[in-house]
Image: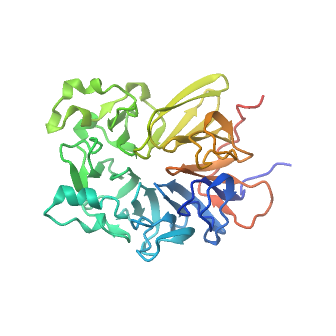
Amino acid sequence: METHSRLTFCLHAWGANSYGQLGQSHVEDQCVPWLSDSSALQGRTVRVVDGGGGHSVVLTESGQLLACGSNAFGQLGVGQTVPHSSELLAVEALKEPVVRAAAGLRHSLAISASGSMYQWGTGLFSHAKRALSPHPVPSHLNSKLPCPVPGLGQRKAQLVTAGSAHCVCLTEEGELFLWGCNKHGQLATAEPFLPSPTLLHRSLLKGEKVTGVCSGWTHVVAQTERGRVFTWGRGDYGQLGRSASASEDAEMLMGIKKDCIPVEVTSLYGATQQSSRGRQTTKEKTVAVVDVKGKFIVISCIEKMEVIIYASDDNCLMKIVCGSEHNLAIVGGRLLSWGWNEHGMCGDGSQADVFHPRLVSDLRPVLIGCGAGHSMAVCGVTTSSTQNSVHTWEELEPKQSSPFSE
């Protein structure tokens, strides 16, 4: 008998949990995927799951934003009376439905249905204070409640992503705005700090509009309307996907040092989607080789990164999310993990590092996300009912055959 359409899904989380960032009503690390049976998720459709340094954000299809974990810097957006929470809390200060959200190291970002940008968490405050003194720090960089971000004018925000101490916003017009700390040139400017959204000149991207953007802890990846992929920022571990010498001929273009200038990664021309985020404390590269139906795909990750690869010739969908030093992947509908496993974030029941991609239980995820040391997945349940069920925000892809079976 053919099963259809409206399947039920649940949020699972595992790994580091010292601040309750797994949203499971406790603060013990979990070495295997565990159901986040929060009442806040009952009957809800999950649209986004994202993790920061020690907190998580979950966005429902109704536009409600939930958060859990550390609130030491106000990154949960619930004020300063809650030091941390192991329960998902509604960010009630956001009065308008949210359509996009992102978690940085110690700050969070959201876009409302009207296209307005909000920021909270004081993770950027110390950087701003040093850079802007004796001038005051703008309120959106020093707020523990969602605060409107000025600087976009009449433009509507469409996509947002967060780095360690910087922010990136893509507007409906295909314009890219960046602000925050520029220690590694991730803002593509000569300024050490940008207190409010500043437009990236389109001439730096060969005059093209931007269609997609993502941020590592200290680098940025953007894709343009013609499928070109540009990277800039910190690149000493290879996270830019190119040699820094590629920008030699643009040493001081528009007053910007060559290392800070967006440079095209020609090998990624036409890539479907790539996004990244992560923490700065990675010590060495993580390289994974995944064999998908005889095809070897090599992934080099230094910071938390998400990569979606569509291989139309063999009808196999791969999605990869990389934490600071661990990784998750959806391949043929199955979940794999590998890398740093000190807090059990690889989900294999141990705390031993995993050196090759390994199947994680029987989970069938459709959404995955990572924090610095924890993992999240929205998965299909195998029974007809569950105590805590949520639905995915998107329709399932046509059923894919697993690369691990004949």
Residue 196 seen from this side:
no
The x, y position of residue 48, in whole percent, is: 53, 56
Task: Answer left or right for 248 relative to 171.
Answer: left
The x, y position of residue 211, in whole percent, is: 39, 43
Out of 399 and 23, give the one closest to the viewer.
Answer: 23
Residue 98 seen from this side:
yes
The x, y position of residue 13, in whole percent, is: 62, 55
Residue 42 sits above or below residue 158 on the image: below
Q: Could you say which quadrant of the image residue 117 lies in?
A: bottom left
Out of 136 and 341, give the one closest to the viewer.
Answer: 341
Q: How is the image coloured?
A: rainbow
- Screen quadrant of the C terminus: top right
Q: Could you say which quadrant of the image residue 309 lies in?
A: top right
Q: Could you say which quadrant of the image residue 96 lies in?
A: bottom left
Task: Answer left or right for 342 relative to 170.
Answer: right
The x, y position of residue 393, in whole percent, is: 59, 57
Task: Answer left or right for 40 relative to 171.
Answer: right
The residue depicted at 41 percent of the width and 61 percent of the height is: 110
Residue 190 sits above or below residue 356 on the image: below
For the image, the number of numbered tags is 0
Extreme residue in the top direction: 294
The residue depicted at 59 percent of the width and 43 percent of the height is: 341
Extreme residue in the right direction: 1
Task: Answer left or right for 386 relative to 94.
Answer: right
Residue 211 sits above or below residue 115 on the image: above
Extreme residue in the bottom direction: 81
The residue depicted at 59 percent of the width and 24 percent of the height is: 296
